[in-house]
Image (cartoon, rainbow, N blue to C red):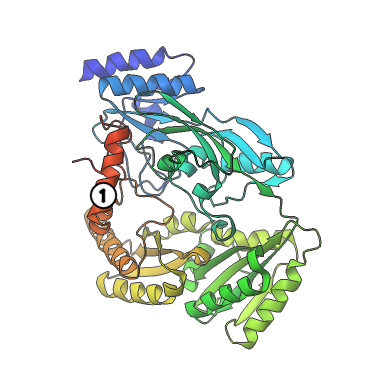
Amino acid sequence: MKNLHTEVLLKLVNIGDMRVLSDTEDMSTYLTDWRGRYRGNAVAVVFPKEISHVSETVRLCNEQGIAVVPQGGNTGLTGGAVGLGDGASIIVNMSRMDQIREVDVVNNSLTAEAGCILSNLREAAEEKGRQFPLLLGSAGSCEVGGLISTNAGGTGVLRYGNMRDLVLGLEVVLPDGRVWNGLKTLRKDNSGYDLKQIFIGAEGTLGIVTAATLKLVPRIRRSGTAMVSLPDVRAAVQLLSLFHERVGNCVESFELMSRGQLEVVLQHPANRQCPMPLEAPWFVMIELGDSKSDFDSEQYLELVLGEAMEKEWVLDAVIANNDAKAQRIWELRHTVSESNIHAGFSVANDTSVPISRLPEFIDTVTQRLEEHIPACRVVHCGHIGDGNIHVVVILDRKFYATEFTRERAAAEANLVVHQVSIDLGGSISAEHGIGMMHVEELERFKPAIDIEMMRAIKRAFDPGNVMNPGKVIRIV
């Protein structure tokens, strides 16, 4: 096997001007996930500059039976871009394929390579008077290919949908090295199966996304932000419904945070400030926006929140009167993951349930976690507008002093959260994906026929099981 790996490595080095790392120390950054929870090994980490590099690499690995692990910004939260533990894999890092090929303002579309960073893509759209509406906390480091492969969500799903809803076309290197060029810019194409959908959310198990054509929308010209305190989650759901009734699809974002989660965010770093007292159990961040220059977002916020206060759904509210204050409010939401890492060993879940069942879900899951997991703190945040709540279980460092006790508690916490979600008609993964973290739970909670169909698709596209094996679905 060692001789085989050496032979493959020599061939990789000779693929154009593709950068290749094979020294363990040089590869270390690319062998561990963002949270530091999963670590793998690899024969090499390669950095293709063009699609032919990806195609030749994948073809070579397929011929030799060596696993291919696609990697973007490595900001995933479920271990989906980490190499195999036995080292028999090639990590294909897409960061050098970062070009924006075209911005078409008439068609409202943008074509970008998989390594393009989200913040750069958004800037390119804004320079042309358009907007790419996907936004999440890792915008400065996450890449287009990873966003597509995990069907990423973020704070704009309420109005614009997940990544799946924003993709018009894809360019993909298939497991045998062939290139599928599906970079269409059409809104309507009913000529057979919509093949691009197979690769969106597949986490690199069916091929490597090398480029994508994405939808753009008119740039938001007037927006307004408010932070609101509420007595309970039911009030948050009622407030969301009221905003939809009063302003329609001008609701850009509607984010829920528990007081406990806000307290954690304010502690890391310690100088971060909240614009309102932490006296209520629940808080919501709201953003309204419209492309019309005469849209008075502050007036709408005042009117709707005033009506909600009369109904006693809202306890207090702060409306940002400038961009700096709005940015400080949203910083509280976008730094949640980073803050939770500093707070202790955290178990973050990514469930979704019907919006109408959110109050029941949060009440039930909090009670059961506190009953089953000693010495833990349960906090919540999420995208209430699409039913996606992140239940975060922060374990006490002293009580869970060993890796064994932490992992056992994490497994128990995941089981509790996922069971409650499934019982209420939900999903165990709303936007983070399955990766290697939730493979067993997917098999536990998904109907057998779902698993059978997934395996059939995997075998049809990748009979040699070389594309990101051990992620999403196990082949037995």
Q: Residue at x 53, y 49 (%)?
A: 165
Is residue 265 at least partly visible in the picture? yes
Query: Measuring 63% from the left and 80% from the top, which residue is drawn there?
Result: 316
**Other residues around mark 1 within 10 Å, as few (<14) / some (14–19) / many (≥20):** some
* Image quadrant occupied by the C terminus: top left
Question: Which residue is at a point 27% across and 75% down the rendered structure image?
Answer: 371
Look at the image and tell me in which quarter the N terminus lies: top left
Residue on which disc 1 sits: 451
Residue 47 x, y percent position in the rendering? 46, 25
- Is 260 situated above or below 109? below
Q: Residue at x 29, y 13 (%)?
A: 7
Mark 1: amino acid: Ile
Q: Note whether 441 is above or below 245 in the view shown.
A: above
Compared to residue 455, the image places residue 5 above or below, namely: above
263 left or right of 404 in image: right
Query: Where in the figure is residue 58, as x and y percent of width and height?
Result: 37, 24
Tell which of 394 and 355 is nearer to you. Answer: 355
Q: Nearer the viewer, residue 251 or 456?
A: 456
Answer with left or right where residue 189 lies relative to residue 206. Answer: right
